[in-house]
Image (cartoon, rainbow, N blue to C red):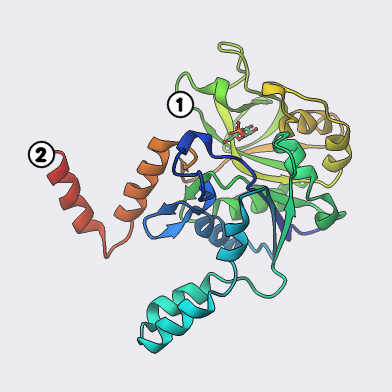
Amino acid sequence: MKPVRKAVLPVAGLGTRVLPGTKVTPKELLNVVDRPILSYIIAEGRAAGIEHFVFVTGRSKGAIEDYFDHQVELEAQLQAKGKLDILAELLGELPRPGEMSFVRQMAPLGLGHAVWCARDIIGDEPFAVMLPDMVMSAAKAPLAQAIEAYNQKGGNIVVVEPCPEGQAHQYGIVALDNPSGRLNRMTGMVEKPAKGTEPSNLFISGRYILQPEIFGLLAEQGKGAGGEIQLTDSMLTLLKRQDFHALEYEGVTYDCGDKLGLLRANIALALARPEMEADVRAMMRDLLG
Ligand code: G1P
Protein backbone atom coordinates (compact mmCIF):
# COMPACT_ATOMS: atom_id res chain seq x y z
CA MET A 1 0.00 0.00 0.00
CA LYS A 2 1.44 3.38 -0.97
CA PRO A 3 1.76 5.88 1.93
CA VAL A 4 -0.09 9.21 2.01
CA ARG A 5 2.58 11.88 1.54
CA LYS A 6 0.82 14.81 -0.12
CA ALA A 7 -2.19 16.96 0.75
CA VAL A 8 -4.33 19.20 -1.45
CA LEU A 9 -5.61 22.43 0.15
CA PRO A 10 -8.30 24.13 -1.93
CA VAL A 11 -7.96 27.84 -1.09
CA ALA A 12 -9.51 29.52 -4.12
CA GLY A 13 -12.91 30.21 -2.47
CA LEU A 14 -14.13 33.79 -2.14
CA GLY A 15 -15.07 33.69 1.54
CA THR A 16 -18.43 35.31 0.89
CA ARG A 17 -19.78 34.32 4.31
CA VAL A 18 -17.18 36.49 6.06
CA LEU A 19 -17.10 39.50 3.74
CA PRO A 20 -16.08 42.32 3.84
CA GLY A 21 -13.22 40.94 5.99
CA THR A 22 -12.15 38.75 3.08
CA LYS A 23 -12.24 41.48 0.42
CA VAL A 24 -8.44 41.81 0.36
CA THR A 25 -7.38 39.15 2.91
CA PRO A 26 -7.85 35.51 1.88
CA LYS A 27 -10.23 33.89 4.38
CA GLU A 28 -7.58 31.22 5.01
CA LEU A 29 -5.35 33.97 6.45
CA LEU A 30 -7.94 35.30 8.91
CA ASN A 31 -6.59 35.03 12.43
CA VAL A 32 -7.70 32.56 15.03
CA VAL A 33 -6.24 33.97 18.26
CA ASP A 34 -2.80 35.00 16.91
CA ARG A 35 -2.19 32.97 13.78
CA PRO A 36 -3.94 32.45 10.46
CA ILE A 37 -6.34 29.58 9.94
CA LEU A 38 -3.82 27.99 7.53
CA SER A 39 -1.22 27.76 10.27
CA TYR A 40 -3.47 25.31 12.16
CA ILE A 41 -4.12 23.28 9.00
CA ILE A 42 -0.42 22.97 8.12
CA ALA A 43 0.40 21.98 11.74
CA GLU A 44 -2.27 19.27 11.52
CA GLY A 45 -0.91 18.03 8.18
CA ARG A 46 2.68 17.94 9.44
CA ALA A 47 1.57 16.07 12.59
CA ALA A 48 0.00 13.50 10.25
CA GLY A 49 3.27 13.06 8.34
CA ILE A 50 2.36 15.07 5.22
CA GLU A 51 5.54 15.96 3.32
CA HIS A 52 4.11 18.14 0.55
CA PHE A 53 1.22 20.61 0.54
CA VAL A 54 -0.43 21.57 -2.74
CA PHE A 55 -2.42 24.81 -2.52
CA VAL A 56 -5.06 25.34 -5.17
CA THR A 57 -5.27 29.13 -5.14
CA GLY A 58 -7.09 31.74 -7.19
CA ARG A 59 -6.81 35.39 -8.12
CA SER A 60 -6.29 37.71 -5.12
CA LYS A 61 -4.91 34.85 -3.02
CA GLY A 62 -1.25 35.78 -3.54
CA ALA A 63 -0.84 36.69 0.15
CA ILE A 64 -0.98 32.96 0.97
CA GLU A 65 2.27 32.37 -0.91
CA ASP A 66 3.84 35.38 0.82
CA TYR A 67 2.84 34.05 4.25
CA PHE A 68 4.90 30.93 3.60
CA ASP A 69 8.06 32.83 2.63
CA HIS A 70 10.61 34.99 4.45
CA GLN A 71 9.67 38.56 5.34
CA VAL A 72 13.28 39.73 5.35
CA GLU A 73 12.76 43.23 6.82
CA LEU A 74 10.48 42.03 9.58
CA GLU A 75 12.82 39.21 10.51
CA ALA A 76 15.81 41.59 10.60
CA GLN A 77 13.85 44.01 12.84
CA LEU A 78 12.86 41.28 15.27
CA GLN A 79 16.47 40.09 15.38
CA ALA A 80 17.76 43.63 16.00
CA LYS A 81 15.22 44.21 18.78
CA GLY A 82 16.03 40.89 20.42
CA LYS A 83 12.48 39.59 19.97
CA LEU A 84 13.84 36.15 19.40
CA ASP A 85 10.81 34.17 20.62
CA ILE A 86 8.54 35.76 18.02
CA LEU A 87 11.23 35.39 15.37
CA ALA A 88 11.56 31.69 16.14
CA GLU A 89 7.77 31.29 15.87
CA LEU A 90 7.76 33.06 12.51
CA LEU A 91 10.57 30.91 11.17
CA GLY A 92 8.82 27.78 12.45
CA GLU A 93 5.89 28.53 10.12
CA LEU A 94 8.08 28.42 7.03
CA PRO A 95 8.10 25.40 4.74
CA ARG A 96 11.14 23.28 4.13
CA PRO A 97 12.45 24.09 0.63
CA GLY A 98 10.07 22.47 -1.85
CA GLU A 99 7.48 21.45 0.79
CA MET A 100 4.74 23.54 -0.84
CA SER A 101 3.37 23.94 -4.38
CA PHE A 102 0.86 26.46 -5.65
CA VAL A 103 -1.45 25.94 -8.61
CA ARG A 104 -4.19 28.31 -9.81
CA GLN A 105 -7.83 27.38 -10.25
CA MET A 106 -8.66 29.99 -12.87
CA ALA A 107 -12.45 29.85 -12.56
CA PRO A 108 -14.61 29.02 -9.49
CA LEU A 109 -16.03 25.79 -10.89
CA GLY A 110 -16.35 23.88 -7.62
CA LEU A 111 -14.42 21.77 -5.10
CA GLY A 112 -14.12 18.80 -7.49
CA HIS A 113 -12.55 21.00 -10.14
CA ALA A 114 -10.18 22.54 -7.57
CA VAL A 115 -8.91 19.11 -6.50
CA TRP A 116 -8.54 18.09 -10.16
CA CYS A 117 -6.27 21.12 -10.72
CA ALA A 118 -3.70 19.41 -8.42
CA ARG A 119 -3.57 16.16 -10.43
CA ASP A 120 -0.15 16.61 -12.05
CA ILE A 121 1.52 17.49 -8.75
CA ILE A 122 -0.09 14.56 -6.91
CA GLY A 123 0.62 11.98 -9.61
CA ASP A 124 -0.21 8.31 -9.14
CA GLU A 125 -0.42 7.99 -5.36
CA PRO A 126 -3.04 8.26 -2.61
CA PHE A 127 -3.34 11.76 -1.19
CA ALA A 128 -5.16 13.80 1.44
CA VAL A 129 -7.58 16.66 0.90
CA MET A 130 -7.83 19.20 3.74
CA LEU A 131 -10.58 21.83 3.58
CA PRO A 132 -9.00 24.81 5.37
CA ASP A 133 -12.34 26.31 6.49
CA MET A 134 -12.56 23.48 8.97
CA VAL A 135 -10.18 23.98 11.90
CA MET A 136 -10.16 20.83 13.99
CA SER A 137 -9.01 20.60 17.57
CA ALA A 138 -8.16 17.12 18.79
CA ALA A 139 -5.68 15.29 21.02
CA LYS A 140 -4.45 13.43 17.92
CA ALA A 141 -4.34 15.31 14.58
CA PRO A 142 -7.60 14.48 12.75
CA LEU A 143 -5.71 13.80 9.51
CA ALA A 144 -3.45 11.40 11.44
CA GLN A 145 -6.62 9.62 12.62
CA ALA A 146 -7.72 9.35 8.96
CA ILE A 147 -4.31 8.01 7.87
CA GLU A 148 -4.47 5.43 10.67
CA ALA A 149 -7.87 4.33 9.32
CA TYR A 150 -6.37 4.21 5.81
CA ASN A 151 -3.48 2.03 7.00
CA GLN A 152 -6.09 -0.33 8.46
CA LYS A 153 -8.62 -0.43 5.60
CA GLY A 154 -6.89 0.90 2.48
CA GLY A 155 -9.06 2.42 -0.25
CA ASN A 156 -10.56 5.83 0.46
CA ILE A 157 -11.35 7.45 3.82
CA VAL A 158 -13.79 10.29 4.47
CA VAL A 159 -13.79 12.03 7.86
CA VAL A 160 -17.33 12.68 9.09
CA GLU A 161 -19.12 13.99 12.14
CA PRO A 162 -22.68 14.38 13.39
CA CYS A 163 -24.53 17.18 11.64
CA PRO A 164 -26.19 19.93 13.68
CA GLU A 165 -29.99 19.58 13.55
CA GLY A 166 -31.53 20.94 10.34
CA GLN A 167 -28.23 21.73 8.55
CA ALA A 168 -27.67 18.56 6.49
CA HIS A 169 -28.71 20.35 3.28
CA GLN A 170 -25.54 22.50 3.51
CA TYR A 171 -23.08 19.58 3.47
CA GLY A 172 -22.12 16.28 1.87
CA ILE A 173 -23.87 13.47 3.77
CA VAL A 174 -22.74 9.82 3.84
CA ALA A 175 -24.73 6.57 3.84
CA LEU A 176 -23.28 3.68 5.89
CA ASP A 177 -23.54 -0.09 5.89
CA ASN A 178 -24.72 -1.36 9.33
CA PRO A 179 -22.70 1.20 11.30
CA SER A 180 -21.04 0.24 14.57
CA GLY A 181 -18.13 2.09 16.14
CA ARG A 182 -16.35 5.02 14.49
CA LEU A 183 -15.07 3.47 11.24
CA ASN A 184 -17.71 2.15 8.86
CA ARG A 185 -17.98 1.09 5.24
CA MET A 186 -19.85 3.64 3.12
CA THR A 187 -22.61 2.66 0.72
CA GLY A 188 -23.26 6.09 -0.72
CA MET A 189 -23.08 9.84 -0.28
CA VAL A 190 -24.98 12.86 -1.47
CA GLU A 191 -23.95 16.51 -1.80
CA LYS A 192 -26.38 19.03 -0.29
CA PRO A 193 -29.40 16.68 0.02
CA ALA A 194 -32.86 18.22 -0.09
CA LYS A 195 -34.28 18.67 3.43
CA GLY A 196 -35.63 15.40 4.80
CA THR A 197 -33.81 13.17 2.25
CA GLU A 198 -30.42 12.85 3.98
CA PRO A 199 -29.28 9.21 4.27
CA SER A 200 -27.73 9.68 7.76
CA ASN A 201 -26.87 12.45 10.22
CA LEU A 202 -23.15 12.32 9.38
CA PHE A 203 -21.63 15.07 7.26
CA ILE A 204 -18.33 15.12 5.38
CA SER A 205 -16.29 17.43 7.54
CA GLY A 206 -13.25 18.33 5.47
CA ARG A 207 -10.51 15.67 5.61
CA TYR A 208 -10.26 12.95 2.98
CA ILE A 209 -7.81 10.25 1.86
CA LEU A 210 -8.40 9.55 -1.82
CA GLN A 211 -6.94 7.26 -4.46
CA PRO A 212 -5.55 8.89 -7.62
CA GLU A 213 -8.25 7.23 -9.77
CA ILE A 214 -10.50 10.09 -8.60
CA PHE A 215 -8.72 12.42 -11.06
CA GLY A 216 -9.95 10.55 -14.16
CA LEU A 217 -13.50 10.75 -12.82
CA LEU A 218 -13.20 14.44 -11.96
CA ALA A 219 -12.04 15.15 -15.51
CA GLU A 220 -15.38 13.83 -16.79
CA GLN A 221 -17.56 15.06 -13.94
CA GLY A 222 -20.53 17.24 -14.90
CA LYS A 223 -21.98 19.98 -12.72
CA GLY A 224 -23.85 18.91 -9.59
CA ALA A 225 -25.34 20.69 -6.57
CA GLY A 226 -25.18 24.47 -6.89
CA GLY A 227 -24.10 24.19 -10.55
CA GLU A 228 -20.56 23.23 -9.40
CA ILE A 229 -18.27 20.28 -10.17
CA GLN A 230 -18.62 18.41 -6.90
CA LEU A 231 -15.95 16.17 -5.36
CA THR A 232 -18.73 14.14 -3.71
CA ASP A 233 -20.23 13.16 -7.10
CA SER A 234 -16.94 11.69 -8.36
CA MET A 235 -16.35 9.95 -5.02
CA LEU A 236 -19.77 8.31 -5.41
CA THR A 237 -18.75 6.97 -8.84
CA LEU A 238 -15.43 5.73 -7.42
CA LEU A 239 -17.29 3.99 -4.58
CA LYS A 240 -18.72 1.56 -7.15
CA ARG A 241 -15.12 0.38 -7.86
CA GLN A 242 -13.20 0.95 -4.63
CA ASP A 243 -13.82 0.82 -0.87
CA PHE A 244 -14.80 3.96 0.98
CA HIS A 245 -14.85 4.12 4.77
CA ALA A 246 -16.25 6.96 6.87
CA LEU A 247 -14.30 7.81 10.03
CA GLU A 248 -16.08 9.64 12.83
CA TYR A 249 -12.99 11.34 14.20
CA GLU A 250 -12.42 12.23 17.85
CA GLY A 251 -12.24 16.00 18.30
CA VAL A 252 -14.09 19.28 17.72
CA THR A 253 -14.54 21.12 14.41
CA TYR A 254 -14.86 24.89 13.94
CA ASP A 255 -16.22 26.07 10.59
CA CYS A 256 -14.10 29.19 10.20
CA GLY A 257 -15.69 30.12 6.88
CA ASP A 258 -18.67 31.30 8.92
CA LYS A 259 -18.89 34.35 11.22
CA LEU A 260 -20.09 32.50 14.29
CA GLY A 261 -17.78 29.53 13.67
CA LEU A 262 -14.77 31.85 13.39
CA LEU A 263 -15.73 33.63 16.61
CA ARG A 264 -16.28 30.31 18.38
CA ALA A 265 -12.85 29.06 17.20
CA ASN A 266 -11.19 32.21 18.52
CA ILE A 267 -12.77 31.86 21.95
CA ALA A 268 -12.36 28.09 22.24
CA LEU A 269 -8.74 28.02 21.09
CA ALA A 270 -7.83 30.99 23.31
CA LEU A 271 -9.40 29.14 26.26
CA ALA A 272 -7.25 26.14 25.34
CA ARG A 273 -4.02 28.20 25.76
CA PRO A 274 -2.90 27.84 29.39
CA GLU A 275 -1.33 31.34 29.38
CA MET A 276 -4.58 32.95 28.17
CA GLU A 277 -7.32 30.91 29.81
CA ALA A 278 -7.80 32.93 33.00
CA ASP A 279 -7.86 36.27 31.15
CA VAL A 280 -10.33 35.01 28.54
CA ARG A 281 -12.65 33.67 31.23
CA ALA A 282 -12.52 37.03 33.04
CA MET A 283 -13.21 38.85 29.76
CA MET A 284 -16.20 36.61 29.02
CA ARG A 285 -17.66 37.15 32.49
CA ASP A 286 -17.22 40.89 32.07
CA LEU A 287 -18.84 40.93 28.62
CA LEU A 288 -21.78 38.83 29.75
CA GLY A 289 -22.35 41.24 32.64
C1 G1P B 1 -17.78 21.10 0.86
C2 G1P B 1 -18.08 19.65 0.44
C3 G1P B 1 -19.09 19.02 1.39
C4 G1P B 1 -18.60 19.12 2.82
C5 G1P B 1 -18.29 20.60 3.17
C6 G1P B 1 -17.66 20.72 4.53
O1 G1P B 1 -18.93 21.89 0.67
O2 G1P B 1 -18.56 19.64 -0.88
O3 G1P B 1 -19.30 17.68 1.05
O4 G1P B 1 -19.57 18.60 3.71
O5 G1P B 1 -17.36 21.16 2.21
O6 G1P B 1 -17.49 22.08 4.83
P1 G1P B 1 -18.88 23.51 0.63
O7 G1P B 1 -18.65 23.93 2.05
O8 G1P B 1 -17.75 23.86 -0.26
O9 G1P B 1 -20.21 23.92 0.11
Tell me: 4 left or right of 250.
Answer: right
Nearest to viewer (mark 1 / mark 2): 2
The circle on residue 289 is: 2
Q: Where is residue 75 in the image (x, y as percent from the top left)?
A: 47, 80
Q: Nearer the viewer, residue 67 or 151?
A: 67
Q: Ligand 1 falls in which quarter?
A: top right
Question: Does residue 154 lie above or below 17 as drawn?
Answer: below
Q: Kindly tell me whether residue 1 is visible in this rendering.
A: no
Q: Where is residue 145 in the image (x, y as percent from the top left)?
A: 59, 51
Q: Kindly tell me whether residue 77 is visible in this rendering.
A: yes
Q: In the structure shown, which secondary structural element does the residue marked by tag 1 occupy?
A: loop
Q: Which of 237 and 111 is in front in this view?
A: 111
Query: How far separated are the C-alphas under marks 1 and 2?
Result: 29 Å
Q: Residue at the spot x=52%, y=74% of the render?
A: 92
Q: Residue at the spot x=62%, y=70% of the render?
A: 95
Three-letter amino acid code of the residue under disc 2: Gly
- The earlier-in-sequence mark between 1 and 2 is 1
The circle on residue 164 is: 1
Q: Residue at the spot x=55%, y=64% of the render?
A: 67
Q: In the structure shown, which secondary structural element does the residue marked by tag 2 occupy?
A: loop
Q: Position of residue 109 (x, y in %)?
A: 73, 34
Question: Does residue 272 lie above or below 289 as drawn?
Answer: below
